[in-house]
Amino acid sequence: MSGVALRSAKKSSVPVSRRGKSSSAGSVSPKKSRCSPFWFFLFAALSVFFLVLALKYLSSTIPAQKSMKLLAVSEAPNGSLVGSVADLSLVVRSGSGRVFIDTFPVTKLDTQISTRFAKEFACSIAKTDCSSRDFFYTLRSSSPLVGGPSAGAAASLLTLAVLDSLDLRDDVLLTGTINSGGIIGPVGGIKEKIDAASEAGASVVLVPQGSSLLYSSNFSGRNDSLFSVGNATNSSVAVSALNISDYALRKGIRLVEISNLEEAVWFATGSNYSFPVQNIEPSPYYLDLMRSISSEMCNRTSRLLLDVRTLDRNNSSHSISGNSSGEPLKASPYQFYIRQALNLSSQGFSLLNDKRFYAAASRCFGANIYLRAAYYSWLNFSVPELEEKLYEIKGAHAKFSSALRNVARKSVTDLQTFIIVDERVREASKYISLAEDSLAVNDSQSAVYYSAYAIERLYSAKLWSRFFGLGTRSVSLDESSLRDSCLKKLSEAEERIQYVRSFIPFSLSETRSDLESAYEAYADGNYELCLFRASKSKAELDVLVSVLNIKESQISSLLDAKLRVAERVIAQETAKGNFPILGYSYFQYASALAPSDRYSALLYAEYAIELSNLELYFDVARREGLVKLSPPLALFLCSLLAGFFAGFSGVSCSARLSAGRRSKGKK
């Protein structure tokens, strides 16, 4: 066969169509290589994602800023009151939680501290972690001096507006202090502030609840106006009483009473920050255990009453019901103990029937102390017998205290239980020491009472320890988080001491002593106890702040507001699955005290607010585990990831195209 014929035969052996496809069903030829649209869509989506993420971090470096007008009063040279308007602006930048205040002219210390309080409450309502931001407040006034805390509510409103990018109405002005729970507190100089608001073109002025009824300018006590300008003094200035609402209307201003910051936000911005009414639904395990604890405590009261009556039955001189005339006996400590025990036990049994378990347990605990002291007094122990009894108490205390240190704390409930039990164990230790000191000077009667107290306090600690292990959510409670929380509460309490001292002349020695005990707990590494004591000290000071310049007639309204705040906080935490056993117990006790002792109820309501905020224990610990990136570093990492995916997509497509070209070349 010739070469031409051979080439022709080879060429015709595999027919190929014009489209380059084999006419034979079994033959395969390379497809046209192209990059799948999937990779382009993936690249585009990831690029947009990382771009948005980068912009989010980048935006945190851009300062947020807003300003508003404040209402103030000053005292003219002739002693008359004059309204004034000051300007407050705020810039928030990325930082570390610091607060800077630039004022001209110079302000008083109370204004500066109240501004810090304002920032705390705004961050709480905005549900924002402000530890990564710095706050720069600037206060300017044409008057010589600006001072007082009545700018607190306005500063909180401004801070919230900056944090949540809210638009403030120019025609709405606000005056009032800011107190725990976001409650707006009373101020003075309302009439003069209405005058200033009218001149400033305002149409609405927000004032604290109870400010619009009748007004009489009476500067009694230190800085009654709570926001003084110029040379305002404490002298009394008589002004005719009038209805402030009517007076404001004649000035073209609508006067609106508000009770909390959420209401102020609604009128000033139109944004609804109010919380829906929620009923507290205690967890079943809390109700069961609290019922058990209070029942056992009050059953112990019944047994001790029976023991005392058995001893007392044959001796009328020690009758627990009084003498033959029906009058209570006064002569001995025994009779005093009995009278106190009967009163407290009656209250305890009644509260138990009403299912107010914490309050019932508290009353029965008090009754048990007096009944045991009466029992020991009747037996008339000698000093050696008391020393032997005290030795037994110390042994039981040491054993239980050692066991407590080894209890694992895995949940918020465990932590709160530890705080409750540890506080009682330490209190028992304190009374053991007092009993020993009394015996050292042969004061057997005091030793009897202190020993009885130590026994009953240790018993209550054992009952409360039943809450260990009942938490439903495990959390990380590392030492570093608890230490930081403790320091934060100590700082907040110190600020409030300085603030209260600027109004109240006495030394606050008792509160100072309680705060020192928190510092001691911190030094000992007992951060749980430090946190608890610092929180209680802060709550006690918050009560003092809340009642500054408040009228007696307003105490009940203030108590109702505090109880509502406590109820709201407890309900919110319960809805999250974190039932605050400590805060709820204080809330119950405050509610029980309200009809008969409003001031004590106010204190326990404040305890409930402070100790129901489980962010003290949980959120801080959670945030510790997060790695915080600076915005520049975050932007760099986002850009790097975007570049990586872009490169990966490009290389993948390039490889596929190259493979296609090589395959086509071979064909």
Image: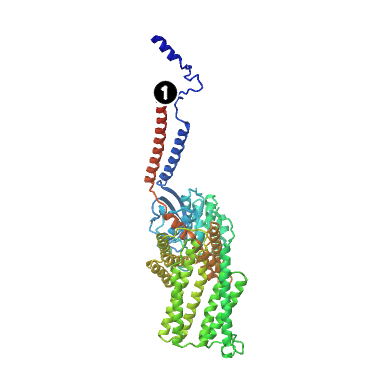
In the image, residue 105 sits, relative to residue 442, either above or below, namely above
What residue is pinned by disc 1? 664
Residue 269, percent across and down? 52, 50
Instruction: Farthest residue to the front: give it.
Output: 1
Task: Give above or below for 274 relative to 539.
Answer: above
Quadrant the N terminus occupies: top left
For the residue labelled by badge 1, is the local secondary structure a helix, a strand or a loop?
helix
- Viewer-side residue, 199 vs 322: 322
In the depicted view, which residue is nearer to us: 628 or 23?
Answer: 23
What residue is shown at x 43% (from left), y 76% (from top)? 430
How far across and down, in percent of the image, does residue 209 sit? 55, 61
Which corner quadrant holds the C terminus? Answer: top left
Q: Quadrant of residue 571?
A: bottom right
Residue lying at the far right of the rendered structure: 353
Is 608 left, or right, of 478 in this rendering?
A: right
Q: Note whether residue 345 is visible.
A: yes
What amino acid is labelled 1 in the image? Lys
Q: How is the image coloured?
A: rainbow
**Residue at coordinates 45% horizontally, 24% vertically from top-left?**
30
